[in-house]
Amino acid sequence: EIRSRARMLWQRFGTDVSSRAILSPVPMLCQMTLLGITKYLTKQNAGSILSTRSGNGTRRLTMDALVGGGNAILLLLTILTVGALGVIGFFARRRNNRGVARLAVGVVGVIAIGYTALLLVASTTSHERTLARGEAKWFCGFYLDCHLGLSVDGTETVKSIMSPRGAVSAAGTFYVVRLRLHNSARNPAINMTLYEPVAKIVDAVGHEYTRSAAGEQAIASASTTAKPLPREMQVTHEPAYATIVFDLPTDIREPRLLITDGWVVDRALEFVLINDENSILHRKTLLALDGVAQVGLNE
């Protein structure tokens, strides 16, 4: 019955959260919470928010369900509850009803401690993952969908890149990484946008390397098809590609790609979002560069 009512609400208020349509009579947080709960309850795993069945048939607690809707709903409900208790405490204080004010403050403290505990447990029990080349990494974050994805389409290594101004040489070796961006939204009219992507290479010992501006400028000027990954990129349902370049040591071991996205506000929210990759102390999901091809872009 709950799922049936949830589907009715979802059909009435919208078919996809990605549209970001605003219902003017409803405050923004309430609207997002309503839509998020409705969408989350219509999933097949709606009844197992914090539990799952293991191989031997027993049930165990897990934080995996708190991704792509569950964690955002919990944060929104926490914000709404704390805000409501704050208002109650404020007016109780003004009316000299100290008992109610203290109770409101106490409940806020319990909620804050409980949420912080869940946040830290989810982060400290997380594991670093490395996805195989071609496997998409999906970005969920604070928004109530996971329709934007990115995968490594191919990697080439060269010592130098020819540009109209001459050859640009690497201090070590240029890794030219071709990315494919994915849009899995069911509605073909909905485009996703990758905001402020930050790309790094992480090696076997944890050293990080940022993008090579010189290498990307040379690639962009020498090729009409290889375009560097911009600060903001709209992703339609058609295949979309972008290129990033790194200047890495020749003896680097196990280079893997780490990409995160989001504005400052997004990252601030995700910092306290349970089980989000960008949350405090959470392990990262990286992309393998296996099958690196040796191609002479300098020829």
Image (tube, rainbow, N blue to C red):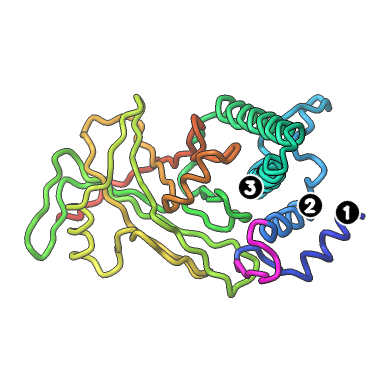
Query: What amino acid type should be assigned to the residue bearing mark 2?
Result: Leu
Q: Position of residue 122 (x, y in %)?
A: 61, 30
Going from N to C along the chain, the mark reached first, 3 or 2, is 2
Left or right, 220 with respect to 64, comes to: left
Residue with the mark numbered 2: 41
Residue with the mark numbered 3: 72
Is label 3 or label 2 in front? Answer: 3
Query: What amino acid type should be assigned to the residue bearing mark 3?
Result: Ala
Vertical comparison of 256 with 17: above or below: above
- Does dot 2 land on a helix, a strand or a loop? helix
* Callout 3–callout 2 Cβ contact below 8 Å: no
Does residue 202 appear in the picture of this structure? Answer: yes
Query: Magenta: predominant secondary structure element?
Result: loop
- Give the quadrant of residue 18: bottom right
Residue with the mark numbered 1: 2
Q: Position of residue 227 (x, y in %)?
A: 30, 63
Quadrant occupied by the C terminus: bottom left
* Callout 1–callout 2 Cβ contact below 8 Å: yes
Q: Where is residue 248 in the image (x, y as percent from the top left)?
A: 23, 38
Left or right, 227 with respect to 105, comes to: left
Q: Residue 296 carries which label?
A: none
Q: How many marks?
A: 3
How many other residues sit within 10 Å of disc 2, few (<14), some (14-19) or many (≥20)?
many
Vertical comparison of 119 with 139: above or below: above
Residue furthest out toward the left: 166
Quadrant occupied by the N terminus: bottom right
- Does dot 3 land on a helix, a strand or a loop? helix
Residue sitting at x 66%, y 58%: 32
Name the one closer to the observer, 129 or 70.
70
| Image: magenta residue range | 19-29
